[in-house]
Amino acid sequence: MTTTRAKPRNVARTAPARSQARAKLRRRPVAKPETEAPDPRRMDDDPVVRGILTAISQKRLKPGTKLGEDRLARALGTTRIHVRQALAHLASRKIVVQFPNRGAFVYRPTWEEAREMFAARRVIEAATVAAAIDRLDKHGKALLKAHMAREAADDRSDRWTSLSLTADFHILIAELAGNHVLLDMARELMLRTSLAIATFEQPGEPDCSPDSHPDIGALVLARDKAAAIAAMTHHLEDIERRIQPRDAEAEVDELTAIFKDLGVAAARHDG
Amino acid sequence: MTTTRAKPRNVARTAPARSQARAKLRRRPVAKPETEAPDPRRMDDDPVVRGILTAISQKRLKPGTKLGEDRLARALGTTRIHVRQALAHLASRKIVVQFPNRGAFVYRPTWEEAREMFAARRVIEAATVAAAIDRLDKHGKALLKAHMAREAADDRSDRWTSLSLTADFHILIAELAGNHVLLDMARELMLRTSLAIATFEQPGEPDCSPDSHPDIGALVLARDKAAAIAAMTHHLEDIERRIQPRDAEAEVDELTAIFKDLGVAAARHDG
DNA sequence: GCGCCGAAAATTGGCGCCAATTGTTTTGGA
DNA sequence: TCCAAAACAATTGGCGCCAATTTTCGGCGC
C-alpha cells in the first residue's frame, strides 16, 4: 500500500480486455492482442435450441404445440433448467410464446404478421441478392454452382432433406452477401416464415416452388442485378400466394386430423 | 367413464385455444372467439430489461461495461433470477454478451459488424420510408408533423431527451410503414447501432445530424419516394461517417479518461 | 524490482425443493 | 340431465443452497 491505491474497483470495466485496468496499464502481458475473449456464449448451438429449431424447420413441430419443460427435459436427456433457458431464448426470438404459469408453445403467427414477414423477406432478400451480385467472386460462384447442382440432383425422396435444400438456397444467397447482420435477419425470417407457412398452408401443396431457384441462381451468376431482384421478389410472392387465411373451423378440422394422424414424435407416455 | 375416454392427453395441443380439444369440441364455450390468449409474456416490458435498455440508449451504460448479477439485483431492487433472465434475453438480442463463469457485458460490436449494422439499417429504413409514403394518411401526416414540431422545438438543453427525440424520428417512420416485423428490426438495429456509435465515435461529435430529419420528413409528407429514400440513405451514411475504427491505444486512452471523469452512475462503494 | 505461483474471496452455474397458478376431474344441487 | 362449485392433480415460477470457475490478493523466488 505504497502508491495511491484508493481507487473504487467497481465502476466500469471493459470486458474483453480482462482487467488490466490498473494492474498492467503500461504494457500488454505477453501474447494477448487485446480484444480477445475465450468463449462468447452462443445460445444457438445449445443442443436443446438446435433440437427444437431443426424440429420446427423440418415441420415435425407444428405451430401451437405445447413445449412442456419436464417433458422436453426427459425427451432431450437434460435438466429442466437447460430447457427453461432454451425456451426463454426461443421466446426472445419469437419462435415460441410463453404464457405465465401455462408454459411455452411453438409460435403461431397471425395472418397479418405472416404477411408482414413475407414483406420483410422481400426487403431483406432483395438486398441480399443485390449484395451477393456485387461481391460475387470465384469462390462464391463455386459455392452457388455447387448448391444448384445439389438442388438439381435432389430426387425429393426425403421430404426433410428437400426442405433443408430449398432453405439453404436462400441462406447461401444471404451468406454470399457478406453481411452477417443481414444474414442473421434472413435466417430469423426464414424460420419465422416457415412457422407462418405451417400455420396457413393449404394441405398438400409444396412449400417452395423449386423451379425458381435455378433461375435466380443463373441470374446471380450472370450478375444481372435488376432481374435477379425481380426474380427473387416474384419467387417470394409465389410462396406467399400459397398460404391462405384460415378461420376457426378449419383449425378445428385440422386439429382432429392431427389427433387421427397422431405421431408428432409422441413422447412415449403409454401406460 | 361412459364414453370412449382412452385418449392420450399429451400429444399436441394448440396453445391459444386453451384446451377445448376434447372437453368442448362441438360448441365453443360462450364468449371466447377462439384464438385468444390472456397474457403473452413480453420480456420487453420487464423492468430490468427496460432499465438496461434505456441506460444503454441514453449512453449511461457504455459497451464493455460489466453487468454483475448481484450488483444489478441490488441496484434495481429485484432478485438475482430476474436479472439472470433479463440478461439472457438481452444476450439473445445481442445487446449484451455472456461469457461462461465470467458474467455479462454490454455488447461491443467489432468494426466490421458496425459497418454491417449501418448497411442493414440503410436497407431496412429505405424500405420503411418507402412503405411509410405508400400508406401515408391524414393521421400519419399529423403524427409526423407533430414529431417534427417537437424536434424543431428542442433546445438541446437536455442531452438525453435530444437523443430520444432523434431516435424517435426513425422509429416513427418505421411505425408509419405499418409493418411490425420491419418495425421490430428497425428498433433492434437502432439499439445496436447506438452501441456501435458508442464504441467507435470520436469524442465530442453529436450523434445524429439533426438537420437531416426535417428534410426527410418534408419529403415524406410530399410523397416523393425516391428523394426520401435517397435522403434517408445519405442521412445514415452521414451518421456512419462519424465513427472511426479505433485501435487498442485509443481504447486504453479512453479508459484512463473514464477513470478521470469517474461518475458512470458510481454504485456507491466508498467507505 | 519484476514476474511467477499459490491461496482466499467473489461470482457465476446448477440442482432441488416448495409455493402459486392453471387445468381437470369429481361432487353436489337445481 | 345439465350446470355450477369445489377439491385434486399437474405444471410453472421462484428462492436458497452448494459446487465450479474465475479473479484477486499475498508471498516467494529470481
Image (cartoon, coloured by chain):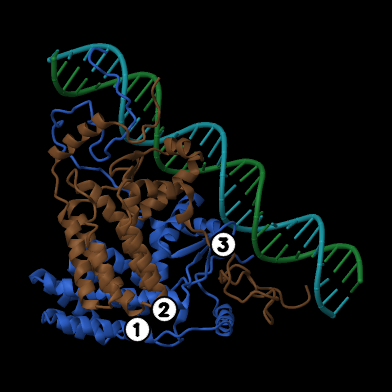
Chain colours: A blue, B brown, C green, D cyan
| Label 2 to label 3: alpha-carbon separation | 25 Å
For label 2, count other residues whose C-alpha is less than 10 Å away and answer few (under 14), some (14-19) or many (20+): many
| Label 1 to label 2: alpha-carbon separation | 9 Å
Percent position of residue B234, x then y: 17, 65
Question: Disc 3 vs disc 1: which is toward the camera?
Answer: 3
Residue in view at x 21 percent, y 42 percent: A36
For the C terminus of chain B, give its image quadrant: top left
Residue position marked by numbered label 2 in the rendering: A197
Residue position marked by numbered label 1 in the rendering: A239
Asked which quadrant contains residue B141, the reply is bottom left
Q: Secondary structure at mark 3?
A: loop
Disc 2 with disc 3 on a shared chain: no
For the N terminus of chain B, give its image quadrant: bottom right
Q: State which chain disc 2 sits on.
A: A
Q: State which chain disc 3 sits on.
A: B
Q: Secondary structure at mark 1?
A: helix
Residue A126 bears which disc, if any? none
Percent position of residue A94, x then y: 43, 64
**Marks 2 and 1: in contact by CB < 8 Å?**
yes
Residue position marked by numbered label 3 in the rendering: B39
Q: What's the amino acid at mark 1?
A: Ile
Q: What's the amino acid at mark 2?
A: Ile
Residue in view at x 23 percent, y 26 percent: A22
Percent position of residue B223, x then y: 28, 78
Image height check: is B17 above or below A24?
below
Image height check: is D14 above or below D28?
below
| Label 3 to label 1: alpha-carbon separation | 32 Å
Image height check: is D1 above or below A175?
below
Q: What's the amino acid at mark 3?
A: Asp
For label 3, count other residues whose C-alpha is less than 10 Å away and answer few (under 14), some (14-19) or many (20+): few
D7 vs A260, left or right, is: right
